[in-house]
Amino acid sequence: MATLTADQREYAERAEAVAEEFTDDAYGWQGSVPWENLQRLAEADLYCPSISEAYGGQGRSDVAAMLLTEAVGRVCPDTGWFTYMQSMVGPRAIDLFGSEAVKSEYLPAVTAGESFVSIAISEPGAGSDVGSMSTEVTEEDDGTLVCTGEKTWVGGVPFGDAAVTWVRFPEGLGSVVIPYDDPGVTIEEVYTNMAGYAQTRFSIDNVVIPDSHVLTRGKEAFKRQLISLNWERLGSSALTVAWAETALEHALAYANEREQFDQTLDEFQGIEWKIAEMYRQVETAASLMYGCAAGAQGHEEPPSRLRTSTAKLHCSQIAEEVVSEAVQIVGARAYQQGHPLEYLYRFARSRRIAAGTDEMQLNTIARALKSDGLPAVSNR
Ligand SMILES: Cc1cc2nc3c(=O)[nH]c(=O)nc-3n(C[C@H](O)[C@H](O)[C@H](O)COP(=O)(O)OP(=O)(O)OC[C@H]3O[C@@H](n4cnc5c(N)ncnc54)[C@H](O)[C@@H]3O)c2cc1C
C-alpha cells in the first residue's frame, strides 16, 4: 500500500513471512490460545509492536500493530485476534497510562506471548450505555481505594492474569487494573460464544486498588483513554479486513478447482462478479482503515473518532458480507462444521457487536457530522 514507509513495509514483510508458519494449525484453535504462535511472533520481534521497548514491545506506531494483525489474521484468524487484543487493547492501555510498577508487573509476560490481559467494560446493566456503569471505586478516609461491582462478556479470563477495568470514581469514569487472583474477584459465569471462546461474568467485592494500579482518573485522563480507543477501532478494522481476505482466498481457490456444467466455477460470469465484488469490498475497507491511520500520522494527532468509527463499522460489515459470500461460492462444503469458512462465518459475526456495536458507531458518526460537519479537504 502506497501509504507505508519503507520501515513499515519491511516490518509487514517480516510479519507475513512468520505468519506463513501458522498455516498448518490455522482453524484448529477454536476457543484455545495459540500460545506457540504468540511466542514465535515475540521471538521474531514482531509481537505487541506498539508497546514500549522497555517492556518487551518494539516501540513502533499503532500502524505496525494494524499491519501485524492483518498479516497474521489473514493466515490464522485466531492468532490475529490475540495479536489485536494484546497489541491494541488492554496491554496498550497499561503501557499508555500505567505506573512503572503496573507496567513491569504485567507487560513483560504479555509481550513474551506468555500472558493475556483483558478489557472489562461491559456490565449486566450497562452494554452500549457505558456511561451508566455501576462498578465503582470509592476512597476511604485513609485514602485507600476500594472497588465493587460486576463485569460481563469479558474475553480471555480463563487464560488471563488481569483486566483493565473501567470503573466509576467519585469524579467520573476512569480505569484500574484488577488481577483475577484477588480474593475479592469471583468468577460468576463462563459463557461460550459462537466461535468457541469463553466470555466471563465476574464480580468484584471490596477489592483494594493500590495507587499503582490506577490507570486513568479524572476527566482529562479519561478523555485521553477514549482517544486511544480510536486506534483500537482501527485494530478491529485490520482484523476484520484480514478475515474477509482469507475468506476471499478460500473462495477463489475453490472456484478455480470445482467443476460444474463442464467448467470451473470461476469461469461463470456470475461467480467472477461475486469475486470481483468481494475484492472491491476488501480493498475499499483496507484503503479506508489505512487512510485513517496515515492521515493521523501525517497530522501527528490520533485518528478522529468520526473516521475510526466509520472504518470500524464498514470493516465489520464487509467482513460478515464477504465471508457469507465465500460460503455461498463454496456451497454445502463450507456449511459443514470444521470447514474454515463455517468457523470464520461465526467468528466474523462478533465484530458487529464487540468493541462498540454498529449502531453505536452510526450514532457517533451522525453526532460528529451534526456538530462539526464533514472534515475539510485539507484534513485528508
Ligand atoms: C465476541 C464479543 C467479545 C466481547 N468482549 C468483551 C470484552 O472483552 N470486554 C467487555 O467489556 N465487553 C465485551 N463484549 C461486550 C460488548 O462490548 C457488548 O456486547 C456491546 O457493548 C453491546 O452491549 P450489549 O451486548 O449489552 O447490547 P445492548 O447495549 O443491550 O444493545 C442491544 C442492541 O441494541 C442496540 N442499541 C443500544 N442502544 C442503542 C441506541 N442508542 N440506538 C440504537 N441502537 C441501540 C445495540 O446496538 C444492539 O444492537 C464482547 C462482545 C462480543 C460479542
Image: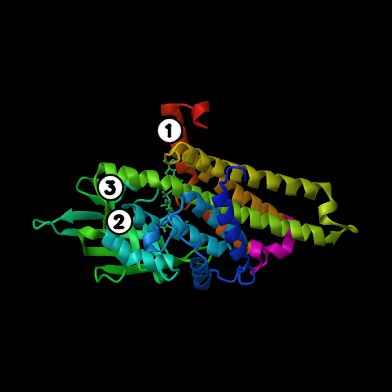
Which sits in the foreground, 327 or 80?
A: 80
Overall secondary structure of the magenta stretch? helix
- The spot of residue 56 in percent (x, y) is 41, 64
Q: Which stretch appears magenta?
A: 329-341
Indicate yes or no whether the magenta region holds residue 337: yes
**Residue in the picture at 31% in, 68% down:** 180
The reply to whether residue 273 is in sight is yes
Proximity of marks 3 and 2: CB atoms separated by less than 8 Å: no
Camera-side residue: 342 or 229?
229
Q: Name which quarter of the figure residue 223 lies in.
A: top left
Front-most of residues 87 and 100:
100
Q: Quadrant of residue 273?
A: top right
Residue 30 in the magenta stretch? The answer is no
Where residue 27 sits in the image (x, y, percent)?
61, 68
Nearer to us of marks 2 and 1 is: 2
- Residue at which label 3 appears: 173
Q: Residue at x 55, y 56 (%)?
A: 11
User: Which numbered marker is on residue 335?
Assistant: none
Give the quarter of the image for residue 74: bottom right
Give the structural element (helix, strand or loop) at label 3: strand
Where residue 188 sits in the image (x, y, percent)?
34, 68
User: Is the residue 64 above or below the residue 310 in the image?
Assistant: below
| Residue 32 seen | no
Q: Is residue 185 left or right of residue 127?
A: left
- Between disc 3 and disc 2, the foreground one is 2
Indicate which disc, 2 or 1, sits on the residue closer to the N terminus: 2
Residue type at mark 2 is: Gly
